Amino acid sequence: MTTVVKLAMRAIQHLDWKLDSANENLGLVTFQTGISFGSWSGISGSLNIEEIEDGHFKVSGTGKQNLRGGQLIALNIAGEAQGKAHKAIEVMKQLISVIPDNEARYASEERAKHERHLQARDLCYELKQKPIDLRSYMLLAEQAGGYIEARGLFTENYVYIKNGKLTKLGKLEQLRPWFIENILPVIENGV
């Protein structure tokens, strides 16, 4: 219920309407719109949230034209007031449809992270056997939370940078022992 009430509140805010109140115990969210066709004072509406079975909710809404500020009559032209409540429910549906997309994106990112870790472990095994290429060192450095950068004008000397701390590594041939000692344990232990 708390989540659905928060979703209703978010829908009202998404529509730039004024949220009057929200009661999680009652499953009630009240709001006001701006000027409408039938009323200078807008429409007062409410969304009623009912749990019909465990984890399943029914949302219904009502609305009425406001009559304030010297206005003598407020016409509900073509059911405009009720239409605002239905619009809020439609926005709730749109907002909820985004959640699975975010969950799918998170799962995809986690899967990619896991695949990078497996690739890094394979590179660790390869590095124990023989020297690897610079691109592979860069992948290992990234997996350990840092990066490699080339320094020098005439000959390339490499450095490893992590959290602003710079470690001088030397030439490409000198990377292997340092990586075996410092980077492989981090990757293999999943630190």
Image: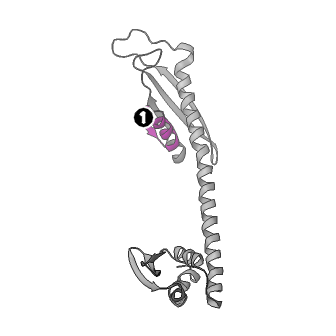
- Please tell me which residue lies in front, 174 or 55: 174
Residue 142 in percent (x, y) is at: 53, 73
**Which residue lies at the image location 60% right of the left edge and 80% below the top edge?**
133
Residue 158 in percent (x, y) is at: 47, 80
Which residue has dot 1 on it? 19
Dot 1 crowding, Cα within 10 Å, few <14, some 14–19, many 20+: some
**With 71 as the anchor, is 54 left or right in this view?**
right
**Which residue lies at the image location 55% right of the left edge and 23% below the top edge?**
82
Residue 29 in percent (x, y) is at: 48, 35
**Which residue lies at the image location 57% right of the left edge and 74% below the top edge?**
139
- Residue 72 appears in which quarter of the rendering? top left
Quadrant containing the N terminus is top right
Task: Inspect the magenta stretch and tell me whether residue 12 lies in it.
Answer: yes
- Please tell me which residue lies in front, 22 or 162: 162
Q: Which residues are magenta?
A: 6-23
Task: Inspect the magenta stretch and tell me whether residue 17 lies in it.
Answer: yes
- Residue 163 appears in which quarter of the rendering? bottom left
**Which residue lies at the image location 61% right of the left edge and 56% below the top edge?**
105
